Image (cartoon, helix red, strand yellow):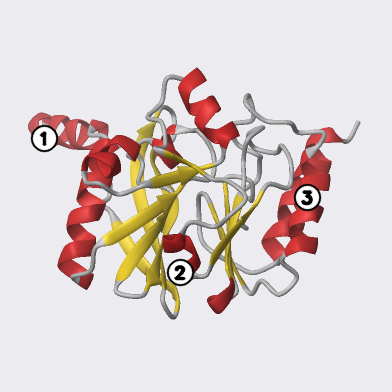
Amino acid sequence: MKILILAAMLFAAQPEATPPLEIEPVTEGVWRHVSYQRLEAIGPYPSNGLVIEAGVGLVLVDTAWGAAETERLLDELQRRFGRPVIAAIATHAHEDRVGGADVLAAADIPVYATPDIIAAAEARGLPVPSHALGETTPPALMVAGISWFAAGAGHATENIVVYHAPSQTLFGGCFLRDAAARALGYTADGNVPGWPAAVEGVRAAYPDAVHVVPGHGLPGGPELLDHTVSLLEERTSP
């Protein structure tokens, strides 16, 4: 009996296994890539990015969470789709967004980001996106039907959102919270007081969005903008 109890205690003490990388459909021509990292006191925690069809290639919105997961993502995309990744765009400078930028650069895949995101990645000691976004849309992003918008500081001072017009898919990244979220998450690099106005700016810029993908958790619709604002109101209310 003592042996059985000891075995049960040892089994219960084992950390929860980190799930493998996932690629899930969002809508036609758009997939969500989900990678995991183990966070203290939470365990395995998912992070979302997008994979978008772009002619004969694919475009990534955000890298996977870190270099190893980004390598796995490239391998899985090649196995599953047999198409090259031709570009990526980063939505802000945190490990779950740019952690695989060096992996993509080593594979000759340009990683686009705003000058503010590039500067923030450098300042935070993170992998730095290789190409700065300017006033004109890079051809690979244009082929994919991708636009981006910097509405203002929220989760991070430099965050942007990405929109795929053909599928009416808005990728909010960590700027938008999933429906199950009950808190804003990490905000040390952000601007909580200015965040609600930035959300309204995104709503005005993309009123036709149907599919909304947050940085963590399950996709939803425009109600995720409302939910994010509600969390902000709770955070800032007296």
Q: Residue furthest right?
A: 238
> Mark 2 packing: few (<14 Cα in 10 Å), some, or many (20+)?
many
Q: In the picture, residue 238 is in which quadrant?
A: top right
Q: Residue at x 52, y 70 (%)?
A: 145
Q: Report the residue marked by disc 1.
A: 1
Q: Amino acid at mark 2?
A: Ala
Seen at 28% across and 44% down, the residue is 104
Closer to us: 72 or 181: 72
Q: Residue furthest left?
A: 3
Mark 3 residue element: helix
Along the polypeptide, which appears first: circle 1 or circle 3?
Answer: 1
Q: Which residue is mark 2?
A: 144
User: Marks 3 and 2: CB-CB under 8 Å?
Assistant: no
| Between discs 1 and 2, the one toward the N terminus | 1
Q: Secondary structure at mark 1?
A: loop
Q: Residue furthest bottom?
A: 28
Is residue 179 in view from this perspective? yes
